[in-house]
Image: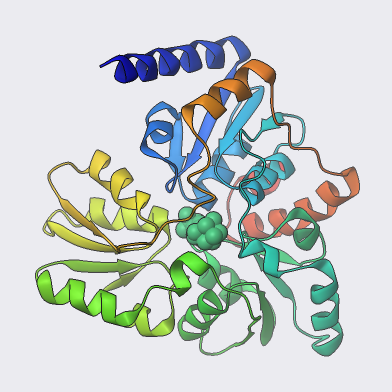
Amino acid sequence: KKVVQEREDLKAEIKRLKEELNAVILAHNYQLEEIQEVADFVGDSLELAIKAGESDADVIVFCGVKFMAEMAKIISPQKTVLIPRPDARCPLADFATPEKVRELRERYPDAPVVAYVNTYADVKAVSDVVCTSANAPQIVRALDAKRVIFLPDENLASWVQEQVPDKEVIPYRGFCYVHHVIKPEVVKRLKETNSDAIVIAHPETRPEVRELAHVVASTGGMVRYVREHPEHKKFIIVTEREMTVRLKRDFPDREFIPVPGAICSNMKKTTLADLHRSLTDMAFEVVLPEEIIRSARRAIKNMFKLMNHPLAEKM
Ligand code: 13P
Ligand code: SF4
């Protein structure tokens, strides 16, 4: 009882501080339930980037991993962007470096570089356009090129290749350990015991896993699919575990089955105590060199242009 009361007190204090600072709390769908509950907005990488661009708050507190907070800073450099846990990195993003991008450009000089949002700012700064799992096929399709370099996720690259067969997608050897380790046998077993369930998989899963899914979608796409299909009551959610928590809150009358062991430890780092400290100490501020912000902005602006999104004009 005491612990619950302390948690509620902390939440109330976070809300008070947030208003005092004119801050907005953005949280990714994989964040702990306690963080999702106090966030102003919970979403996928693209939805959160758009919120960062559209918000009129002075401070953005980003509960997620570092590349996402960087993305918010690049889109809104005039705002103070805080990340409560700067050690929350993404091992997938760590695969790509600016040097590797330069090497690939030399090898394929005619191919534009598409950087998945799961990259750090220095990689975006040397890329032509950014994409997320929500718009990757759309961006590659819209590019005026016969072949594209796509980095760093090889599973996402192979999904994009399937979706856009008239272009060559040059992949890169990178993967997300959380999704890559999900075995097809595990998903098959879940399907056998839940034969009435719809299987939705994230495109960072292996092709053999993706093939077992009825739907392949970003985490935001998963929410939309469930919303648009009230006729389906049960879903196997082939992505990080907390996604089922997010879905259950929005759709309490449906059933969501997670994949055992699919946990992103970096997404689990941020606690209510971290978020509270972030607001009291204005910690930890995302700071990027101006030059990197300018170059990475260009690649993000290109993404919004190819999506015909109004933020392209604001950037
Ligand atoms: P989404 O953009 O689909 O939320 O994916 C982000 C991510 O890190 C997936 O592992
Ligand atoms: Fe990175 Fe994978 Fe975690 Fe997403 S789930 S943040 S891609 S490690």
Q: Nearer the viewer, residue 302 or 123?
A: 123
Up-down: is 308 above or below 194?
above
Q: Which residue is drawn at the image coordinates 64% and 72% (left, top)?
A: 152
Q: Which residue is drawn at the image coordinates 32% and 81% (left, top)?
A: 184
Q: Which residue is drawn at the image coordinates 58% and 56% (left, top)?
A: 308
Snapshot quadrant of residue 59: top right
Percent coordinates x, y for residue 306 in the rendering = 62, 62
Snapshot quadrant of residue 210: bottom left
Where, quadrant-wise, is the N terminus in this rendering? top left
Q: Nearer the viewer, residue 36 or 24?
A: 36
Q: Is residue 193 left or right of residue 135?
A: left
Up-down: is 312 above or below 193?
above
Q: Nearer the viewer, residue 5 or 56?
A: 5
Percent coordinates x, y for residue 77 in the rendering = 76, 36
Q: Give the colouring mode of the picture.
A: rainbow
Q: Nearer the viewer, residue 259 or 307?
A: 259
Q: Which residue is drawn at the image coordinates 67% and 86% (left, top)?
A: 147
Percent coordinates x, y for residue 130 in the rendering = 66, 62
Q: Is residue 9 left or right of residue 111?
A: left
Say whether residue 26 is visible: yes
Snapshot quadrant of residue 111: bottom right
